[in-house]
Image (tube, coloured by chain):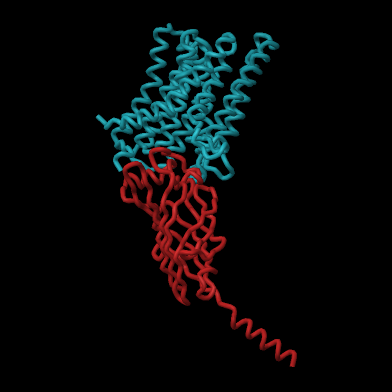
Chain colours: A red, B cyan
C-alpha cells in the first residue's frame, strides 16, 4: 500500500514538473545590433555570427536561461570605414578579443515584461547588465525583444571619449525554434 | 596631397597628447639638470616616463584604477601583448640606468686592460632583460605562425639599444632623443594611414616625450642616453602589434622601415667612421635615420588613404 502511494505521489510530482526546452541561438535567429551616437550623428551596426542556446522550462519566461558567444570579427556597420575602425584596438580589438559572451544569471518579472540579468563579457572584462525584455515561450518557439543601453567605458572601451558618446544602445531580437 | 586632419582632431591631439608629453618630459629634464650634468641620464629616463604618463593620464576616469587614457598602466591577466608595452619600457629604462651605474662602478675597480669587463657587464644585463621582455610583446597568433619572430624581436631590440646608446654616449644625447622623436612621429604617420588612432596616439606620446628631452638637453649637450630604452621597446613594439591588430593596405615594409630606422647608427660603432669630423658625422647620422622614415611614410601614403571620423 505504502509503495503504491509513493508511486502515485512520484508520478504526480513528475507530472507537475515542466520539462526544459533548448533553443539553439545562431546569427540567423538572433540579432544583436547596436546604435552608437556622437554629437550630431549616429551609426548602426551589429554582429552577424553568434552561437549559443536559450533554455526555458515549460512555457514560463521567468525560467529562461541564455548562454551565447558572439564572434566579434563578424561585426558590421552602416559604413565600411567605420566597420574597420570598430574592429581595431580603438574599439572592439577583435584580434585580441575574438569572442564576446553573455550568460544570464536570473530572470525576473517586471512591470513591462521581464528583466534578464546576466554577465556580459567584452574586451576580456565581465560586467553585470540588466536587459529589459519582452519574452514569449511556447513548447517549440521562443521570442525575445530587448532594447537597452550600456556604458562602453565600463568594459574599458574608452577611446574617442568626447567624440563618441559613452552610452551605446543595444537591440537584441530572438526568434528561435527548437 | 592627402587631406588634412580636421582642426578639432589636431587640437585634441595637441591638447591631450603632444603638449603634456613634451612639457612633462622637458620639465623633468630641467629639474634634474638643475642638480648638475651628472643627473642628466637619470633625468632623461624619468622624463620620458613622466612625459608618457602625463599624456596617458585621464581625469575623466570612472575610477582610480582606470586612469589610463590610451593604454592601461599595467596589463591585466590575459591582456593582449601590447598592453605590456608601458611596463616593458619601464623595466628597460630601469635596467638601462642600473646596468650603466654597475658598469661605472666596475670600471673603477678594473685596470685599463680589463675595462672591457665593465662593458660586458652592462650588455650582459641588458641582453638578459631584453631576452626576457621581448617575447612577451609578440602577439600570440604570430608567435605560433612564425617562431622566428621572438628571437628576431630580441635581436632587433638589442641592435637598436646598441646603436642608439653608442651615439648617445658620444656627446650626442639630445641628437639621439631627436632621432627618437622623429622615428616615433614617423611611426605615428604610418599608423594613421594604417587606421589605428590608438596606436598613433601612443606613438605621438612617445615622440613628443622624446622631443621634450631633446629640446631640454640641447643647450647643455647633456647626456640623454637614459631615454634610449623608450625607443628600444616602443618602436618595434608598436609597429609589430599595430601591424598585427589592424588590416590595411599599408605594406609591411613601412612597418619594418620605421621599427628599425635607428639601426643605421650601428655604422658609427666602427671607429674609422666615428672618428670622421663632426660636420660629416652629424648630417650622415641624420640622413641614415630619416631616410627610412621618409620612405616608410611615402610607401604608406601610396598604398592607403587617410580616413577621419568626420567621414563616417
Q: Is residue B262 among what the camera can see?
A: no
Residue that lies at the very extreme toward the bottom in this rendered image: A1
Q: Residue B271: x, y in percent?
A: 50, 12
Q: Residue B174: x, y in percent?
A: 47, 14
Q: On screen, A49 above or below B221?
A: below
Which of the pair A76/A137 is nearer the observer?
A137
Dividing the image into 4 quarters, which one contains the N terminus of chain A? bottom right
Q: Is residue B111 among what the camera can see?
A: yes
Q: Is residue B148 found left or right of B283 in the rendered image?
A: right
How many discs mark residues in the rendered view? Answer: 0
Q: Quadrant of residue A11?
A: bottom right
Q: On screen, A101 above or below B301?
A: below
Which of the pair A55/B1 is nearer the observer?
A55
Residue that appears at 36% across and 22% down: B291
Q: Is residue A72 found left or right of A77 in the rendered image?
A: right
Residue that lies at the very extreme toward the right in this rendered image: A2
Residue that appears at 48% across and 28% down: B55
Residue that lies at the very extreme toward the front in this rendered image: A111
Q: Residue A16: x, y in percent?
A: 59, 81
Amino acid at each position: 500500500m505504502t509503495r503504491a502511494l509513493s508511486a502515485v505521489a512520484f508520478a504526480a510530482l513528475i507530472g507537475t514538473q515542466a520539462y526544459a526546452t533548448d533553443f539553439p541561438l545562431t546569427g540567423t535567429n538572433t540579432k544583436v545590433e547596436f546604435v552608437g551616437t556622437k554629437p550630431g550623428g549616429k551609426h548602426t551596426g551589429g554582429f552577424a555570427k553568434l552561437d549559443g542556446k536559450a533554455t526555458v522550462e515549460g512555457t514560463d519566461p521567468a525560467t529562461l536561461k541564455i548562454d551565447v558567444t558572439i564572434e566579434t570579427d563578424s561585426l558590421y556597420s552602416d559604413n565600411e570605414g567605420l566597420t574597420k575602425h570598430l574592429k581595431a584596438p580603438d574599439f572592439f580589438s577583435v584580434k585580441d578579443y575574438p569572442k564576446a559572451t553573455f550568460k544570464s544569471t536570473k530572470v525576473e518579472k517586471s512591470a513591462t515584461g521581464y528583466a534578464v540579468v546576466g554577465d556580459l563579457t567584452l574586451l576580456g572584462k565581465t560586467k553585470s547588465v540588466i536587459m529589459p525584455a519582452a519574452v514569449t515561450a511556447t513548447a517549440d518557439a521562443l521570442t525575445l525583444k530587448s532594447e537597452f543601453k550600456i556604458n562602453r567605458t565600463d568594459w574599458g572601451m574608452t577611446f574617442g571619449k568626447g567624440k563618441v558618446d559613452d552610452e551605446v544602445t543595444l537591440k537584441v531580437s530572438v526568434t528561435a525554434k527548437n | 596631397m592627402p587631406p588634412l586632419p580636421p582642426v578639432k582632431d589636431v587640437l585634441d591631439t595637441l591638447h591631450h597628447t603632444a603638449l603634456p608629453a613634451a612639457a612633462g618630459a622637458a620639465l623633468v629634464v630641467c629639474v634634474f639638470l638643475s642638480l648638475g650634468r651628472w643627473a642628466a641620464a637619470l633625468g632623461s629616463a624619468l622624463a620620458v616616463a613622466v612625459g608618457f604618463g602625463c599624456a596617458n593620464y585621464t581625469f575623466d576616469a570612472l575610477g582610480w584604477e582606470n586612469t589610463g587614457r590610451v593604454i592601461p598602466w599595467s596589463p591585466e591577466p590575459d591582456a593582449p601583448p601590447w598592453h605590456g608595452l608601458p611596463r616593458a619600457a619601464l623595466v628597460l629604462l630601469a635596467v638601462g640606468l642600473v646596468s650603466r651605474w654597475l658598469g661605472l662602478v666596475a670600471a673603477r675597480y678594473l685596470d685599463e686592460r680589463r675595462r672591457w669587463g665593465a662593458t660586458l657587464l652592462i650588455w650582459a644585463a641588458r641582453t638578459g632583460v631584453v631576452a626576457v621582455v621581448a617575447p612577451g610583446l609578440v602577439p600570440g597568433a604570430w608567435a605560433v605562425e612564425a617562431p622566428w619572430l621572438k628571437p628576431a624581436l630580441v635581436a632587433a631590440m638589442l641592435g637598436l639599444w646598441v646603436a642608439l646608446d653608442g651615439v648617445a654616449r658620444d656627446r650626442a644625447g639630445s641628437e639621439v632623443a631627436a632621432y627618437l622623436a622623429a622615428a616615433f612621429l614617423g611611426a605615428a604617420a604610418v599608423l594613421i594611414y594604417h587606421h589605428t588612432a590608438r596606436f598613433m596616439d601612443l606613438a605621438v606620446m612617445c615622440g613628443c616625450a622624446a622631443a621634450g628631452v631633446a629640446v631640454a638637453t640641447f643647450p647643455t649637450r647633456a647626456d640623454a642616453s637614459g631615454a634610449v630604452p623608450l625607443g628600444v621597446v616602443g618602436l618595434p613594439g608598436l609597429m609589430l602589434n599595430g601591424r598585427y591588430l589592424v588590416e590595411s593596405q599599408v605594406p609591411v615594409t613601412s612597418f619594418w622601415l620605421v621599427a628599425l630606422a635607428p639601426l643605421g647608427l650601428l655604422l658609427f660603432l666602427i671607429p674609422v667612421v666615428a672618428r670622421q669630423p663632426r660636420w660629416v658625422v652629424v648630417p650622415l647620422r641624420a640622413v641614415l635615420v630619416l631616410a627610412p622614415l621618409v620612405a616608410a611614410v611615402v610607401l604608406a601614403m601610396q598604398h592607403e588613404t587617410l580616413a577621419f571620423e568626420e567621414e563616417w
